[in-house]
Amino acid sequence: MKNLKIFVLMTGLLISSAIKSQVSVSVNIGSPPQWGPVGYSETRYYYLPDVEAYYDVHTSMFIYFGDGVWLHRSFLPQRYRDYDLYSGYKVVMTDYHGHEPYIHFKDYKRKYAKGYRGGTQKTIGAHPGKGNSNKKMSSKSPSNNNGNQGNDKNIRNSNGKGNSQDNNKSGKSDHGHGGGKGKKK
């Protein structure tokens, strides 16, 4: 009888921990980053022509070619540490629904070459340190604070400022790929 009680108790604890694990895994998956374009909350991938990389909204990972393979990382490569994701142009991949957006890389690279720009593009959130405060941001790290991360839930500013939401509620751009004035810093 005592063994049965212990077995029931252990089974209950095991089921309880499994339920908690499932809940914690599904929270905040697929949230667009603050630097993402307004009006595309259901889109999974962006192509970033200036850095020849993709961003996967569902996993909050960048996908880029390096060391002979396509890498999935939470940060862009070191050579793009100063690239400003808020200003950079994002091609919204509305027509692709697979798991390997890079299978059409040659087509995207040709159609959206480095420096490609389309119409006006607004980001979901305000650029950190631009218009949010009179204080200027200071950066002691060469790769932080310039919008070079995936989802803003991972950003830690050195001055502790958070991002404010953009009050402009504009919809999708006219041509279906998002637009924007992007640039390298």
Image: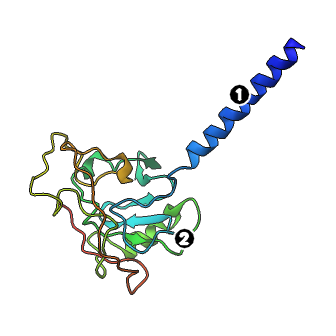
Q: Nearer the viewer, residue 111 or 179?
A: 179
Residue 95 lies, with reference to residue 18, above or below; the image says below
* Coloration mode: rainbow
For mark 1, what is the residue? 13
> Secondary structure under badge 2?
loop
Q: Is residue 129 toward the left or the right of residue 22 in the image? A: left
| Inter-mark Cα distance, 2 to 1 | 42 Å
User: Total label count?
Assistant: 2
Q: Nearer the viewer, residue 116 or 127?
A: 127
Residue at 59 percent across and 64 percent down: it is: 98
Q: Is residue 69 something one can see in this rendering?
A: no
**Residue 76 makes an appearance in the image:** yes
Q: Amino acid at mark 2?
A: Tyr
Q: How far across and how far down the image is residue 134, in percent?
A: 9, 57
Task: Give neighbour class at mark 1: few <14, some 14-19, many 20+ (Cα, 10 Å).
Answer: few
Query: Could you tell me which secondary element the residue under label 1 belongs to?
Result: helix
Residue type marked 1:
Leu
Does label 2 or label 1 sit earlier along the sequence? 1
Q: Quadrant of residue 175?
A: bottom left
Q: Which mark is residue 96?
A: 2
Residue at image coords 36%, 74%: 112
Residue shown at 19% from the left, 40% from the top: 141
Is 1 displayed left or right of 181 in the figure? Answer: right
The dot on residue 179 is none
**Residue shown at 21% from the left, 53% from the top:** 82
Choose top left, top right, bottom left or bottom right for residue 55. Answer: bottom left
Q: Which x, y percent locates residue 83?
A: 24, 57
In the rendered view, would you say 134 is above or below 123?
Answer: above
The residue carrying pointer 2 sits among few (fewer than 14), some (14 to 19) or many (20 or more) residues within 10 Å by Cα, namely few
| Outermost top residue | 2
Reply above or below: 172 against 162. Answer: below
